[in-house]
Image (cartoon, helix red, strand yellow):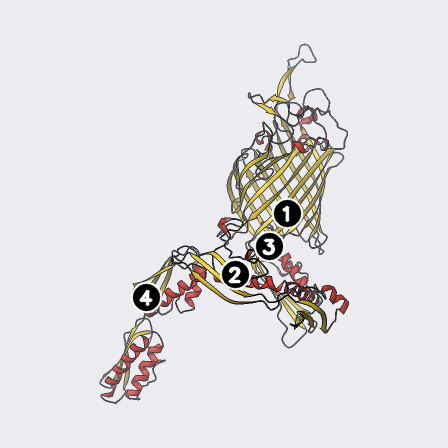
Amino acid sequence: MKRICLLLMLLAATGLASAETFRISDIRVDGLQRLSEGNIFSYVPLEVGDTMTPSLARSTIRDLWETGFFDDVRLSREGDVLVVTVEERPAISAISIAGNRQIKTEDLMPALANIGIAEGEIFNKLELDRVRQEMIRQYYSRGYYAVEVDTNVGELSRNRVNLSIVVEEGAQARIRHINIVGNETFSEEELRDDFESDSKLGWFFWQGANKYTREKLSGDLETLRSYYLDRGYLDFSIESTQVSISEDKRDIFVTANVREGEVYTVSDVVLTGELILGEEALRRLIMVEEGDTFSRKQVEQSVNNITTVLSNIGYAFANVNPVPRIDRDTLETELNFFIDPGKRVYVRRVEFRGNTQTKDEVLRREMRQFEGAWFSQSAIDRSKLRLQRLGYLDNVNVETPAVEGTDDQVDIVVSVEEQPSGSFQVGFGYSQVQGLIASISVQQDNFLGSGRRVGFAVSHSDIYTQASVNYTNPYYTDSGISRGFYARYTEFDQGDANISQFSTSQAAAGVNFGFPLSEVDYLRFGLGVQDVDINIGGRLVPVDPDEPDSPFEYRYVADRPLGITLDEDGDGFLSPDERSVTTYRLDGTWSRDSRNHYLNPTTGSLHRLGAEVALPGSTREFFRLNYRFRKYWPIGDNGMAFSLKGDVAYGDAYDNYDDELGIQPIEPELSDGRGRECQLDEVVTYDTGLPFYEHFYGGGVSDIRGFDDNSLGPKDQFCRSVGGDFKVIGGFELAFPLPNIESSGTRLAWFVDVGNVYSDVDSFETDLLRASTGLSLTWQAPVGPIIINVATPLKEREGDETQIIQFSFGQTF
């Protein structure tokens, strides 16, 4: 079409210009709207004074046409004036794409730009079909073969247009069957087991395991090739692949024709090249031995082992080339690992880019690769991980360019993208226990670019009020010892939280120090003081005065068993002083955290061991111990993970303040005062061991799910939870990603929880353990975490307070 238009214009120009040649006295351009005459003259091979000829007319039209700016170009003469008349093509003012749910607009725009369709570019109506074809190509590559694309051009003023693209995506084609032809040793089911685009539904039907894309199919063919090469089939090949689609474009059928070949064994393993590590050390890194069946996976792992060790001692550009020497007569292969370590490299300079707020020294202290030291890939990887864990860097990229003019020096260039480190949040939420929650917080995790953390928060709910301030310097010393201070005031009504009838008003302050022991080990110690005013359910009773003529006195009698704990003089009454408790706390925590992600880990583990002691001089002297365990295993590479968890906590008093603890037999039938019979594991009539206001509690949306908050464990004689000195929780989860959701703080998991709370260790019985299973959805929303559990008990006892649906919205405490 373009050639036809150009030919017609050239013929017209030839006719006009051939009538008479003339000397050009002036050149005039008509029809311009957006372009200037200067733009035209830069493409016209004519000047005033030139003689107009037919060949010049043709070349002028050709040159202007090839700019792509015009739909029409004409030359005419008015006396000795050359008149250039053009019809400008419009410019694209805006491009809109509608109906594209599966492919984001920002992903489609670059594809259109590659064919010259972008805002501000010249629009050619002849390119509309290319636009449609490019959109269809993008969807075809993702398996949407039923896609339909319509385009519409809307004219605007000043020779501009809007380009509107409407997409009807249709359903994504699914793999209905993958047929492998030529496999004799392995069954089709074995070979397809690891296919990403298999016709199986996978773990969960909405993951779309059988949805077709070209990339998935290419990956599956490579998986098939690897399967055979890892089992010795060195001559394996995929002869051909056929992909057919059903008439409705919904079903894909794949046929792969393969030739297996024979199985080869390793006849010898040879090391050549520069063996700077020593042959003995190198052979320990090689995973394949003489007599083994050939395995490409083992060969690749051997290469990776050697290059990793070399890269950690300065050989940044080491190359290990495994060369097989195949003997098809004996079905054996000799493996020759040729090692070229290259020049040993050291780091000249470490440079940071993109840190407009954070000081260089804050980032530099996280580096484990130092200037002037030998290059170490493991040190660089650890440095990157430490930077990512700071919390105020969104992205960290490390490059190692060679220093120009040298062959033994590199620079480390660390490019970072900072994210806001300060936050001011006003949030509202709701939970089934706390009711309406309101909070306001100011937190700065990178105060003045120093890496120090400063925060203030106030929150209030139906049962809980807290105000707190905190300050932490993560590098109080150059060696990485941290120091922090905190102060908080808390009011908590335990009675409204399914706990016995008491409430507390607490003021606390303290200091803590942290000591890094290794890249994954951390030790923390803290010292603090806490004053608690305890209000226990009870009543005022008249007491005969000491003097006969004095009026009656009223003194406070608290409910049992909690009141006995505070009645220091044993007179049966609680004075204001007896309801005030002071605790001097010393605590310490050791943790080992190798998880790969804070919110959604898929690999690694967490071990955390903590101890807390109420020092001599406290109103009550006690200790508490706790241990937390988490272990994660990835399943595939799509974010699915299996995890185990375990929590154990124990506490006791060491001040010989030992009021008797009466434990009634299991399953007493008592009334809670509301006409309801309750069957209980343990009924506590006297408090001993750990003070009741320091007890552990069980059940809730983030604890033993499926059971009401704080409802498990020992009760008082009114069926109210009093907690206990010993708590144990275990369980596992299978977490998997949600479709079309990229947030790292969002997950859905199937869980099984097991656990309970006991008055002490001696009271532990497996028969009293509770268990539940269900689904849990967690979303780290801007206002705080949103948790929704749908659970059902697997093991419960009559009278247990269970909840099928549990949820918490907003900030929780």
Disc 1 marks which residue?
471
Could you say which is closer to the camera, residue 752 or residue 99?
A: 752
Disc 4 marks which residue?
160
Q: From the image, state whether disc 2 or disc 3 is nearer to you.
A: 2
Residue 346 picture quarter: bottom right
Disc 3 marks which residue?
448
Q: From the image, state whether disc 4 or disc 1 is nearer to you.
A: 4
Q: What element carries label 4?
A: strand
Amino acid under label 3? Leu
Could you say which is closer to the camera, residue 622 or residue 270?
A: 270
Looking at the image, tell me whether mark 2 or mark 3 is earlier in sequence order.
2
Could you say which is closer to the camera, residue 108 or residue 524?
A: 108
Amino acid under label 4? Arg
Q: What element carries label 1?
A: strand
Amino acid under label 2? Ile
Judge the density around disc 4: few (<14), some (14-19), many (≥20) Cα neighbours within 10 Å: some
Could you say which is closer to the camera, residue 551 or residue 32?
A: 32
